Amino acid sequence: ECSNTVGSYFCICPRGYITSTDGSRCIDQRTGTCFSGLVNGRCAQELPGRMTKMQCCCEPGRCWGIGTIPEACPVR
């Protein structure tokens, strides 16, 4: 959540996120489960360990999630 100030603004990030170095956005640092692909529209082939969404989604075709509802990584 970002708020305007006189001549600038500041952001307050929710739990699990950090403020970017320039203070313009919140970066997701939560860790979750990464899946190597989609099979019939569902996330499959769970990878070992926990990763941030950014770490997981740097490879195309992957899925990432926290809890029971993983989501396909954004198309780059």
Image (spheres, rainbow, N blue to C red):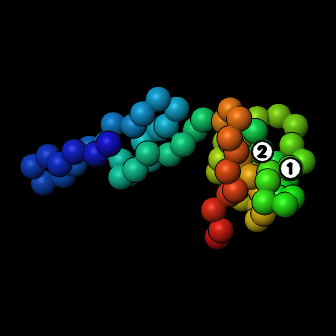
Mark closest to the chain's N terminus, 2 or 1 = 2
Looking at the image, which residue is at 86% across and 50% down? 44
- How many discs appear? 2
Residue type marked 1: Ala
Judged from this view, the residue extending furthest toward the top is 15
Asked whether the viewer can see residue 67, the reply is yes
Quadrant in which the C terminus appears: bottom right
Image coords of residue 54 (percent x, y): 64, 51
At horizontal 75% and vertical 39% (from top left) the residue drawn is: 33
Q: Nearer the viewer, mark 2 or mark 1?
A: 1
Q: Residue at x 50, y 45 (%)?
A: 27
Residue nearest the viewer, comparing 29 with 46 = 46
Secondary structure under tag 1 reads strand
Please identify the quadrant where the N terminus is shown: top left
SS class, disc 2 = strand
Coordinates of residue 12 in the picture (x, y in percent): 33, 37
Q: Read off the residue under disc 1.
A: 44
Q: Nearer the viewer, residue 1 or 67?
A: 67
Q: Amino acid at mark 2?
A: Cys
- As drawn, the residue found furthest toward the left would be 6
Disc 2 marks which residue?
Answer: 34
Compared to residue 40, the image places residue 8 above or below, namely above
Q: Is residue 55 visible?
A: no
Q: CA distance from mark 2 to mark 1?
A: 9 Å
